[in-house]
Amino acid sequence: MGRLLKLLILVALPVVAAVWLADRPGEVTIRWQGWRLDTSLAVLVMLLLAVLAVVHGLGTAIRAVLRSPGRFLAARKSRRLKEGYRALSDGLTAVAAGDSRRAHRLARRADKLLPDRSLTGFLGAQAAEMAGDPTTAEKHLAEMVERPESAFLGLKGLLALALKRGDQAQALDFARRAWALQPGAEGLATILFDLQARAGQWAEAELTLAEVKRKGSMGGADLLHRRALVLDQRAAAAEAAGDTRGALTLALDAHRADPMFVPAAARAARLLHRLGKDRRATAVIEHAWRAAPHPALVEAWIALAPAETALMRVKRMERLVRANPDSLDGHLGLAEAALSARLWGQARTHLSIAAEATPSARAYGLLARLEREERDDDAAAAAWTAKAAAAPAASSWHCAACGRQAETWQAVCAGCGAVDGLEWR
């Protein structure tokens, strides 16, 4: 509606002006340098308008000529940008498809066409890495780090290269710098935590977990378990330094963070026993036993009363079994205590439960001992011993990443450096 009104006004104005001039005829005389010009007012107005139109046309033509080089350069720049972004997009597609040759060719083309090489750094790095040229890849990623908009992505790429070549110190530096730019970034928290753990920087790892908790970038159970791991290792360091009470505080905090984390519970029980707090040590073991029964907890339970009689040990083992009747380790521990107390029936009952549920060399070995000590039956004992030899090996700590066996639990695998990778199997 507004445009129509403007058009009507533009058309009406010349018409009104022409009518006004027609109703008011007049003559105009111009004398200049001996020249004389006689004409009507209407003709003079039309002549002036014609002169103005010619001047305007000439001005427009001159401006067009003067601006043509700039427009040509702008059009050329725009065309190069379009072609550069197209090469960048197609190159990323080639990387995703695993076409290293095409990715490398398109990366070089994008580098030539786009003015900011940090934009093409990621593509160039990916193409170089696919071609087996980590030096060039690192160069591209370093250029990305110099640009604030791409610094985080560049640091993550450098981090991946450092991890690939096994440079833990440099990887930790890149991870810290990336974390400073984007704390709580998905996936980065785990990498930074593991690198700090491998370096033995448990206090720094705890600060990382605190930041992760604030950002909410890690699941609750996983966060609590990692906190328990950190606190347990800090407790180990305090214990090694002779600070028993400080170690106990940290170990109890670790146990509270994750009651299923057996090493922390066993450490807390041992430290409590050392300080003469056996009742509380008993409560810690029972709490952990209900959540995650383990032979280490049986050992910690027995260690609370090293001078007890065989019958007293049976009574205490019965209490542990009642706390978690489904634990085969508890039945085996009670059976062994009953054998030492010469309670043959009780020993046989619990050995039968354990052997039927999960055949093991330990259960068969104890049954062989039972046959010898109760009945003096060497033939039956030999049969159980043969079964024990053919039974699966006893459970032990194994690294889930590299399969390396360890005699005791370790926070970091000595073989491959996996953090908290040891499993009991």
Image (tube, rainbow, N blue to C red):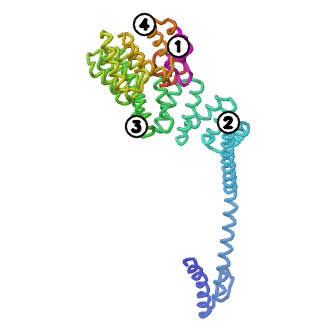
User: Residues in magenta?
Assistant: 382-406
Q: Can residue 169 be seen from the camera position used here? A: yes
The nearer-to-camera label among 4 and 2 is 4
The nearer-to-camera label among 4 and 3 is 4
- Image quadrant of residue 281? top left
Q: Name the residue under label 2.
A: 127
- Specify the amino acid type for callout 4: Glu
State the image coordinates of residue 171 (x, y, percent, origin top left). Answer: 53, 27
Give the numbered dot on residue 213.
Answer: 3
Q: How many dots with numbers?
A: 4
Dots 2 and 3: beta carbons under 8 Å?
no
Considering only vertical position in the picture, is 113 above or below 251?
below
Label 3's element?
helix
Considering only vertical position in the picture, is 21 above or below 169?
below
Give the numbered dot on residue 388.
Answer: 1
State the image coordinates of residue 214 (x, y, percent, origin top left). Answer: 39, 39
Looking at the image, which is closer to me, 159 or 361?
Answer: 361
Q: Which of marks 1 and 2 is nearer the N terminus?
A: 2
Q: Earlier in the sequence, mark 4 or mark 1?
A: 4
The nearer-to-camera label among 2 and 3 is 3
The nearer-to-camera label among 1 and 2 is 1
Whether 22 is among the magenta residues is no
Label 2's element?
helix
Looking at the image, which is closer to me, 68 or 208?
Answer: 208
Residue shown at 66%/67% (left/top)?
A: 59
Question: Residue 196 vs residue 286: left or right?
Answer: right
Q: Earlier in the sequence, mark 4 or mark 2?
A: 2
Question: Residue 310 vs residue 394: left or right?
Answer: left
Q: Which of marks 1 and 3 is nearer the N terminus?
A: 3
